[in-house]
């Protein structure tokens, strides 16, 4: 009788353990599977996108002398509406820390221009470029009317390659017309890792 | 006795099923991981693109009726064999498929007001003609133009980016420009 009872208890305990083991194995497996799918899903690439509508004013040279130095490029900020997938791209709000690889950079921004103190030319020119590490690349130039037709929309797309383990990327702007200014308003950037 | 035997059999059966289940879960996991990584590799290789830029000036005098092919010879980056540029960097042979084309260019109007047409040449057809104008007065002479278009080719087809200045007695110069072609 004792033997019968102990066998029965053993059997029931086994059954309970089996169920518990199966539940835990299944849930562990499912959890691991989900994490794997999320982190290794090859269809969705690493990307980072952000926007900003905080006005940034970028002033031109304070001298109209032809030998006057151009002011330095200023990095645009992207601190709002941040979306990210993967770990290849990080941002501190104005610099994007990219891991080694190839990236597609897409930018859209609205710029208004105006005359600062001391007058200024009827037209305002500004350069917009990418800064990758210490280098300024893909510099484009835009002109806008300083007094009437003051707003303009600039978009660009560019593939860049990061050869080093990590490199910082920024979208930079400088005003080249003396005494005038360029104001960046609504802007957005999307960076997608291609390889 | 019968009960004893039944209980023992049930116990052994339960124990063995735990082992079988544990083995199958254990066995599946690395297999699945392998499948995932091979899928990952094959899908990663499906990201086909070509990107390039150029800063050599192209002068566009108006009025012009014929187009000039834009060149993209610097900073070339590509993945895959779906997109092949020619030696001049002005024609791109696209294999069958769907592609997204993105072009950005700065042009400077150097004489009077220029009206620039930007277009795509796909095989023998000139498509997606866009126009931007810029005057050369008051130093308001630079313009950044961008175009985006998805195209589909059902056989290997050559693609070019075209520009022309249609305004009489005017002149423009194309400077910085970039192209991105992504296979979708």
Image (tube, rainbow, N blue to C red):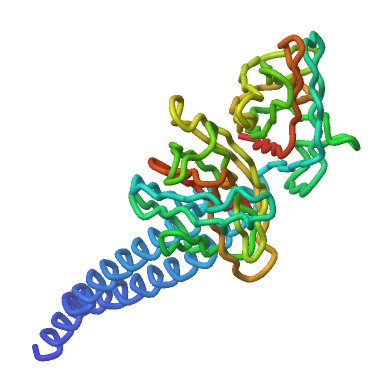
Give the left or right position of residue A128, taking residue A10 as reference.
Answer: right
Give the left or right position of residue B2, taking residue A114 as reference.
Answer: left
Residue B154 in sight from this viewpoint = no
Name the spot of residue B71 as percent of width and height, x first. 81, 33
Asked where in the image residue B140 lies, by quadrant, the reply is top right
Of the pair B83 and A75, the residue shown nearer to us: A75
Name the spot of residue A172 as percent of width and height, x first. 54, 53
Of the pair B133 and A78, the residue shown nearer to us: B133
Of the pair A14 and A191, the residue shown nearer to us: A191
User: Is residue B7 shown above or below A114?
Assistant: below
Q: Residue at x 63, y 24 (%)?
A: B137
User: Is residue A165 shown above or below B117?
Assistant: below
Give the left or right position of residue B6, taking residue A147 as reference.
Answer: left
Name the spot of residue B115 as percent of width and height, x first. 67, 16
Q: Residue at x 15, y 80 (%)?
A: A8
Q: For the N terminus of chain B, give its image quadrant.
A: bottom left
Q: Which residue is drawn at 46% across and 63% down?
A: A90
Residue B51 in sight from this viewpoint = yes
User: Is residue B100 shown above or below B12?
Assistant: above
Q: Residue at x 59, y 46 (%)?
A: A176
Q: How many marks?
A: 0
Of the pair B114 and B31, the residue shown nearer to us: B114
Name the spot of residue B146 as percent of width and height, x first. 60, 30
Q: Residue furthest bottom?
A: A2
Q: For the C terminus of chain B, give its image quadrant.
A: top right
């Amino acid at each position: 009788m004792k033997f019968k009872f102990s066998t029965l208890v053993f059997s029931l305990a086994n059954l309970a353990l089996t169920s518990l083991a199966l539940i835990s194995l299944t849930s562990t497996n499912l959890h691991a599977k989900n994490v794997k799918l999320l982190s290794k899903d090859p269809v969705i690439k690493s990307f980072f996108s952000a926007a900003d509508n905080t006005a940034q004013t970028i002033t031109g040279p304070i001298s109209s002398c032809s030998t006057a130095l151009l002011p330095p490029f200023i990095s645009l900020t992207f601190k709002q509406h941040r979306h990210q997938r993967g770990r290849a791209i990080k941002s501190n709000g104005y610099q994007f820390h990219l891991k080694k690889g190839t990236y597609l950079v897409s930018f859209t921004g609205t710029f208004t221009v105006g005359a600062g103190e001391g007058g200024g030319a009827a037209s305002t020119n500004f350069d917009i470029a990418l800064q990758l590490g210490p280098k300024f690349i893909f510099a484009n130039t835009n002109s806008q009317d300083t007094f009437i037709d003051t707003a303009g929309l600039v978009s660009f797309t560019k593939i860049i390659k990061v050869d080093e383990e990590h490199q910082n990327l920024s979208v930079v702007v400088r005003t080249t017309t003396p005494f005038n200014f360029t104001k960046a308003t609504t802007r957005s950037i999307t960076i997608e890792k291609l390889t | 006795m019968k009960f004893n035997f039944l209980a023992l059999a049930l116990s052994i059966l339960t124990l063995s099923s735990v082992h079988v289940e544990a083995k199958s879960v254990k066995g599946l996991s690395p297999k699945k991981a392998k499948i995932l990584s091979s899928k990952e590799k094959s899908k990663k290789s499906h990201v086909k693109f070509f990107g390039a830029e150029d800063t050599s000036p192209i002068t566009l005098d108006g009025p012009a009726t014929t187009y000039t092919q834009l060149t993209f010879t610097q900073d070339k980056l590509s993945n895959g064999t779906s997109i092949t540029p020619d030696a001049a960097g002005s024609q791109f042979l696209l294999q069958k498929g769907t592609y997204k084309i993105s072009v950005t260019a700065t042009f400077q109007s150097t004489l009077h007001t220029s009206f620039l047409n930007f277009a795509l040449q796909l095989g023998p057809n000139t498509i997606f003609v866009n126009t931007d104008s810029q005057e050369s007065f008051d130093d308001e002479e630079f313009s950044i133009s961008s175009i985006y278009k998805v195209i589909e080719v059902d056989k290997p087809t050559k693609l070019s980016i075209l520009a022309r200045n249609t305004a009489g007695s005017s002149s423009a110069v194309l400077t910085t420009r970039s192209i991105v072609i992504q296979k979708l």
